[in-house]
Image (tube, rainbow, N blue to C red):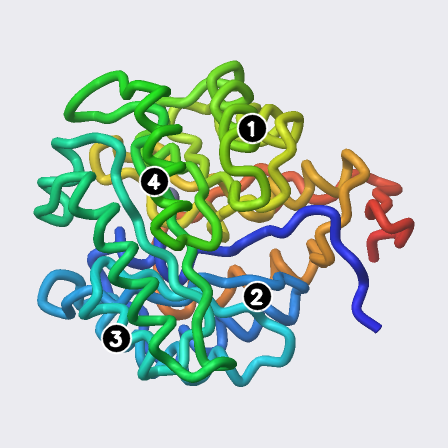
Amino acid sequence: MEEEVDVLVSEVGPRDGLQSIKRVMPTEVKHRWIKALAAAGLREIEVGSFVSPKLLPQMADAEAVVCEAIKIPRLKVLALVPNLKGAERAIAAGAPKLTLPVSASREHSLKNINMTPEQAIAQVAQLRALCDSLPAGQRPGIEVGISTAFGCTLEGPVSEDWVIEMAVMLANNGADSIGLSDTTGYANPAQVRRLFTRLFAEIGDKAGGAHLHNTRGQGLANVVAALEAGVTTFDASQGGLGGCPYAPGATGNIVTEDLVFLLESMGLRTGVDLDKLIAARSLIAEGLPGEPIYGFVPDAGLPNGFVYAGGRAAA
Ligand code: ZN
C-alpha cells in the first residue's frame, strides 16, 4: 500500500524550470528524468507546456512527454495550457490535469498572454465547457494559478482584494482549484499567511496550492507561512532549475530538495526519498551539461541521524 502524505510536493522542473532555460533538454532525457523524480516518491509532476513551439522550442515535445509520463503508475501528470488551443492539444495527448496561469497584474497579463485578466478569467469558463463536453472519465481536472498574486515587476504592488475577487470568479467559472503564485519573488510570510487565509475563507476546498519563488531568499519562510494558513500543496523545482533571467545567479523556483527536507524535518510526510531525489539531479547534468543547479541540502547532505516524518531513518 502507498504511504500517505501530509503535504503534496508538486514538481515543476520539467515545465517551469526547463522553459526558462534557452537550451533544449533532449526528449529522451526528459523521460528518464521524470521517471527518476517519480521513483524518488514525487506524486505530481508538471511535465510540459502546450504553448506554441515557436515561442518555446523547449516545450515542443510536450505531447511525447505527456504520453510517456502518464504510463508511470500513480503519478499525477500536469500540463500547463496557456489557452484553449493548448488545452485541446493537452487533452488529445491524454493529460489528466491541466493548469492554466491567470495573471492578477493587468500589464503582466497583456504582455504575457495578450489578454486582460477579465478575458483570461472568461476563458476558464470556456475551458470548463470544453472539458465537460468530453465523455465522463476523460475529463481532465482544471487548476488555475493566479500569477503575480503577491506583486508584479511591471505594476508593483497588486491589490489583495483583487486577487481574492479573481479567485471567486475563477471558482464560479468552473476551476477545480485555484492557487496563488509568487511569480516575481515579491512575497513575504505575513502577506502569504494573510492572502491564503482569505483564500480558504472565500473559496474553501477550491483553494489550491502555493507556487513560491526564492528570488529574494523568502521562499522557505513563505512555505512555513502558507502551511500555517492551511496550504497542503507546494510547487518546487529540482535544483531550483530556471533561475530568474533578470538576476544572474539568483534562483527562481524554490528548490524541491530543500522543500522536502523542510517538510520532513517538521514532521510532515511527503513520500519523497531525499537520496533518490538528489540522485535524480544527474539527469539534469546529462540533459543540460553545465547548467547551474542549486540547493542547500544537496550541498550539505542530510544531518547525521536524520529521520523522515514517517519514522524511517535515512540511508
Ligand atoms: Zn515558478
Which is more N-terminal, label 2 or label 3? 2
The answer to which image quadrant residue 160 occupies is top left
Which corner quadrant of the figure contains ligand 1?
A: top left
Which is more N-terminal, label 4 or label 3? 3
Mark 4 residue crowding within 10 angstroms, few (<14) / some (14–19) / many (20+): some
Q: Are marks 1 and 4 in contact (CB under 8 Å)?
A: no
Residue under circle 3? 88
**Relative to 49, 38 lies left or right:** right
Q: Nearer the viewer, mark 3 or mark 4?
A: 4
Separation of disc 3 and disc 2 at Cα? 27 Å
Quadrant (top left, top right, bottom left, bottom right) of the C terminus:
bottom right
Q: Amino acid at mark 4?
A: Met
Residue under circle 4? 169
269, above or below 187, in the image: below
**Relative to 140, 21 lies left or right:** left
Mark 3 residue crowding within 10 angstroms, few (<14) / some (14–19) / many (20+): some
Separation of disc 1 and disc 2 at Cα? 34 Å
The answer to which image quadrant residue 148 occupies is top left
Disc 1 is placed on an element classified as helix
Residue under circle 2? 37
Disc 4 is placed on an element classified as helix
Give the image location of residue 72, x and y in percent: 57, 80
Q: Nearer the viewer, residue 20 or 281?
A: 20
Mark 1 residue crowding within 10 angstroms, few (<14) / some (14–19) / many (20+): few
Residue under circle 1? 201
Q: Nearer the viewer, residue 282 or 122?
A: 122
Q: Is residue 79 visible?
A: yes
Disc 2 is placed on an element classified as helix
Give the image location of residue 15, x and y in percent: 36, 60
